Image (spheres, grey):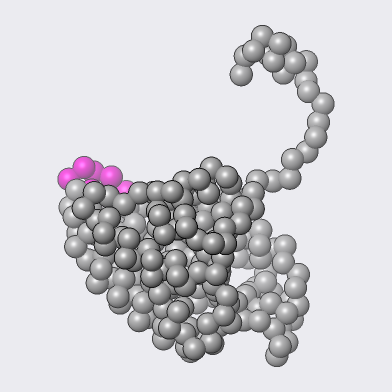
Amino acid sequence: MSHNANSMKTCILVDNHFRGGVATVLLTLLRGQCEEDIEFVLVTNINNPMLGNLDIGRAELTKVIPFQFISTSNWFAGTSPWISRNRFTLVINILRKIIKPFLLVHQTFYFARLFKTENFEALLNVNGGYPGSITSRAAALAWSRSSSAGRHIMAIHNFATPSRLGLRSIDRVIDRKVISTIDEVITVSESCRKSFVNRSSLDAHGKITVIPNGVETVVREISNREFFRKSLNVN
C-alpha cells in the first residue's frame, strides 16, 4: 500500500500475549483494509506472538514500534510456565498490586512522548476484555495529552470484569479518566456489551457500537444426522 502525504497516520496499539482473537482481528483488519488515505503504525509489546505472522507483507504497515515494560514481561503477564506454581502465583499477584500504580504513571509518560514524536492523528486501542492491560489505559491517558490527538476508538473483544473488592474506588477514578478520552467503543457481541454494567463509567459511555467478529455465516442444508438429532431435541 502506498502512503501519500495526506494519509491519516493511525496508531494501532495492542498489548497481546496469545495467538487468539485479538491477533486474528488485527490481521484481518490489516489484510482487508484498502483505504489509500489511512496509514497504519502498529505499536505493540515486543513479545507479542502475532509479530511472527506479519510476513503477510509490510505493505499493510508503515512500521512496527515495539515496547517492553515490566507489565508486558511473560512473568508479569502470567504466561511464563513457572508462574503456574501456586506459591509463585501468590507472590506475583501481590507484587502486581503494589507496583501497578507506578507502572501506569511511567507508561503514561512514555506514550505521551511517543505520540508527540510520531504525531499520530487517530488511535485504535485494542483490548481483550476491559479494563485490559495497564498499557492500554496508560495509552488512553497519554492520548488526551497529545497535541495532535484526534479520534480515539477502543475495541473490546471480551467481557468487562468488575473491580476487586477494596480497589473499586481507585478503579472508578481511573475508569472515568480513561473513558473520557474515548470517542467510540467497539465491541464484538451483545453479551460483551451487556457486561459493561460491571464498569459503570464504561456502561454510561454515549457511543458503543457492536460489530460481530465472527466469520460470515454460510447457509447450508441441514444433514440427515442433524435433522435426526433436532427431532429428538438432542444438542
Q: Is residue 139 visible?
A: yes
Count the marks: how many? 0
Q: Is residue 51 visible?
A: no
On the image, the x and y values in percent for residue 50 come to 53, 60
Indicate yes or no whether the magenta region holds residue 176: no
37 left or right, relative to 119: right
Q: Residue at x 61, y 19 (%)?
A: 235
Indicate yes or no whether the magenta region holds residue 85: yes
Report which quarter residue 218 is drawn in: top right
On the image, the x and y values in percent for residue 103 come to 28, 71
Out of 110 and 140, give the one closest to the viewer: 140
> Magenta part of the protein: which range?
81-89
Out of 19 and 129, give the one closest to the viewer: 129
101 left or right, relative to 158: left
On the image, the x and y values in percent for residue 211 come to 64, 53
Relative to residue 202, is residue 5 depicted above or below? Answer: below
- The quarter in which the N terminus is drawn is bottom right
137 left or right, relative to 24: left
Relative to residue 155, is residue 84 depicted above or below? Answer: above
Q: Main secondary structure of the magenta part?
A: helix
Most distant residue in the top direction: 232
Out of 174 and 56, give the one closest to the viewer: 174
Q: Residue at x 35, y 81 (%)?
A: 109
